[in-house]
Amino acid sequence: MSIDRIRPDLEQLVSLNPIEELLRLVSKPVEYSPEEVTAVLPSIAISGGGLALVSLFLLTDNLLCEVRSTGAKAAWDFDYVAKSTVNNVRFRIGRQEIKEVETVVKVYDVAFVGLHHSIENFTTDITYAGDDLDQWMKRVLTLLPIRLVLP
């Protein structure tokens, strides 16, 4: 399998991680995937007053693969789950203020999308923090439409 199709998605994340590290993170999951990876959805959180990449979600026609950003240069941490196992989608959307002493220095849009699966005790948590929540939510709902929960 080739990374070329998802490289543009990864290049949009270079403010969070260098492209070389992003390419390394997805190399093994893309190689082992039985289907072509067609899109990347980042999970981003607030860390130390700034933003941090928590994980990358690789999507195929039938699979969702979470690739966790471990920080270890020679390690990979990922799993696959069938998108057809999603039976509930939970949303939490809001804003988070970053304060220094009592002064608000930054306000981020934040979101949580929780996918509950028919597999016992298995959930997928996707988070967002940043300045473009509407665009991120549009991408989430395009790649993981709520109709996934329909029988």
Image (cartoon, rainbow, N blue to C red):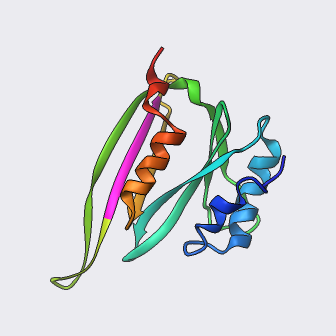
- Magenta span: helix, strand or loop, mainly? strand
Q: Which quadrant of the figure has residue 149?
A: top left
Is residue 127 visible in this depiction of the protein? no
Q: 48 or 87: nearer the eye?
A: 87
Q: Which quadrant of the figure has residue 90?
A: top left
Q: 121 or 137: nearer the eye?
A: 137
Q: Which quadrant of the figure has residue 35?
A: top right
Q: Please determine whether, in this image, residue 48 is positioned above or below residue 44.
A: below
The image shows residue 134 at horizontal and vertical percentages of 37, 55
The number of numbered discs placed on residues in the rendered structure image is 0
Measuring 26% from the left and 62% from the top, which residue is drawn there?
95
The image shows residue 31 at horizontal and vertical percentages of 82, 47
Measuring 44% from the left and 54% from the top, which residue is drawn there?
136
Residue ranking furthest to the left? 102
Measuring 49% from the left and 48% from the top, which residue is drawn there?
139
The image shows residue 15 at horizontal and vertical percentages of 55, 75
The image shows residue 12 at horizontal and vertical percentages of 59, 67
Based on the picture, tell me whether residue 34 belongs to the magenta stretch: no
Give the side of residue 50 with respect to residue 97, left or right.
right
Q: Please determine whether, in this image, residue 34 is positioned above or below residue 67.
A: above
Based on the picture, tell me whether residue 114 belongs to the magenta stretch: yes
Residue ranking furthest to the top? 151
Measuring 67% from the left and 52% from the top, which residue is drawn there?
77
Is residue 9 visible in this depiction of the protein? yes
Q: 59 or 134: nearer the eye?
A: 134
* Magenta-drawn segment: 109-116
